[in-house]
Amino acid sequence: MTYRSTQPHSSTAPNFHICVALLHDVNSYQQEELRAIVAVVAWRMGNHNADMERLTIAKHRVGDAFRSTVNAFTTTGGESKFLENGTLTPEEFVAAGDQLTFKFPTWRWEEGDAGLRASYLPKERQYLITRNVPCKDRVRALDSALDQIKSEDDWLLPPEVSGSASNDLKDVDDLAGPSEGKADPVGPGLNLNFDADDDFLGDGAAKASNLPDFSDLDKQLQQEDGYPAAATAPSVIVAEAPDANILKTRTYDLSITYDKYYRTPRLWLFGYNENGDPLTPEEVYEDVLSDYKSKTDLHWPLASVRKTARVEACDISTGSSCEVCQKARYCRHLLQYLAHNGNRHGRSALVTAIRKSYPRTKNDDWHRILDFAIQHDLIDLDIIPGREDRTLKGSKG
Amino acid sequence: MLRMFDWSGKDETCEQVKKLLKKYPDRIPVICTKAAKTSLPEIEKKKFLVPATMLCGEFKFIIHKHIAATGSPKESMGPDQTLYLLMNNSKKSVKASQFMCEVYAAHRAKDGYLYIHYSAEATLG
């Protein structure tokens, strides 16, 4: 994780703001130093893999320690800085969370452990959580499926990902029929995209001969355990395909906490496998698109034994995550957030849009801003929904 | 599936779109170029005929891959950047859970294409 300093806005920045920016700078410098020390310590420990793991944990502990130190000397209160730099005050966090739980009741407030409570948040509103979000298959299935792009003239034809409504409709009429020419661009890579729909919709009619063979389930399980997360080689995919529709449903608990250091909400992922056992960080990575892996920190929180994937969160993401949650019952977790300290194009465009829409927006009008943002899709948390939801809502003409 | 769209425009491009849609009734013509203010490279192929039921998140993933395939290390996305897809006429960002046909219905241009721009923002740290 890197610490970025907050860019003070030269004209509008109050002194307080600059102080925070300085603190960030000091932190990033000292953290580099400590990281080096940790690296040396870890290097002396022998076993390489274990070292990397320990190093990661140590790094995050150092980070946590730093942040808690800084937190002890900074205050949370003060005016809203949302429009200027996208940060939230705890009050705004609570307000946004109330709205989230109101609109999307799958999200709930939790109290948390008494010893870990943050004084700047109400006792019964420490963090938000939504549980048992199903995640049916791994992201590498999507990865390899979308690789099969055909081109015609100067047009690229990405494959239809299995379970698409058009295929479904045809296949229902023609259950036993052979796979149509239309399915060709899909390619063999898609065969591993088993999901529950296959059983009902005959999407897998052509794959009937590939029905799962339970006799060597144990073996397959063992094999699967050995697979690296990034494995996409065709041979590997073929080997694991048979049990994909039985064993792969994972569930995730998603929680949102307030991060006092960054003054933003932070999203946490906590995954379980099909048996309800917690996932290791490596396994969680199987659900994160490769491009985002380096951007997703995995660590063991100090106060908890649970292994948790931590993703940098930001300002208005709270509102968006719920939007997605309601609509899509997420499957894959690909996370993106707006910058929380940027005064770049995107941020200023957002601010301009909000200001235009609500000319008299005051800093405390958080609800209206959130509403606006939800309505106008200005915020999004990319959680790609599962294929079980792939019906053409309201667009069948 | 795309019959619901009203083809009011009658210019030349629209004819091409009609032809395409006749041949591929379940696909949507998308032209994806880079946004004006971004350091990202131009992708080689800009024209996509995507399935109507493809999710925007999946389309973004495809664009992601194309950018990775074309860009020199200097130009490509930094480790702290995230890709955004923006609609031409509204500058709105797309939501990953939307279908491409939903986006098309809402944002298609008069000539029948869906114009999408991609851009990157430093968002992760």
Image (spheres, grey):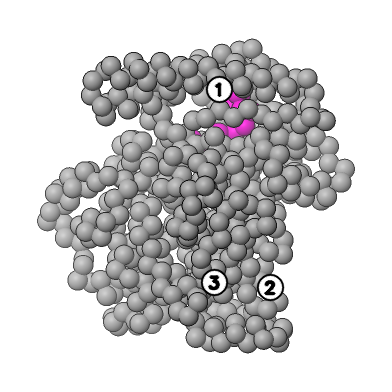
Numbered disc 1: secondary structure:
helix
State the residue at coordinates (32%, 48%): A230
State the residue at coordinates (28%, 16%): A44
Residue type (three-letter) at the residue carrying disc 2: Ala
Say whether disc 3 or disc 2 marks the residue closer to the N-terminus: 3
Circle 1 sits on which residue?
A28
State the residue at coordinates (33%, 27%): A53
In the figure, B87 relative to A41: above or below?
below
In magenta stretch: residue B78: no
Circle 3 sits on which residue?
B47
Residue type (three-letter) at the residue carrying disc 1: Ser
Q: Which residues are magenta?
A: A259-269
Mark-to-mark CA distance, 1 and 2: 46 Å
Q: Are marks 1 and 2 in contact (CB under 8 Å)?
A: no
Q: Are marks 3 and 2 in contact (CB under 8 Å)?
A: no
Magenta residues, dominant SS class: strand
**Taking the image as drawn, is residue A64 in sight?**
no
**Residue A241 appears left or right of A10:** left
Q: Which quarter of the figure is the C terminus of chain A placed in?
A: bottom right
Mark-to-mark CA distance, 3 and 1: 43 Å
State the residue at coordinates (41%, 29%): A299
Indicate which label's residue lies in the foreground, 1 or 2: 1
Circle 2 sits on which residue?
B109
> Percent position (x, y) of residue A251?
39, 44
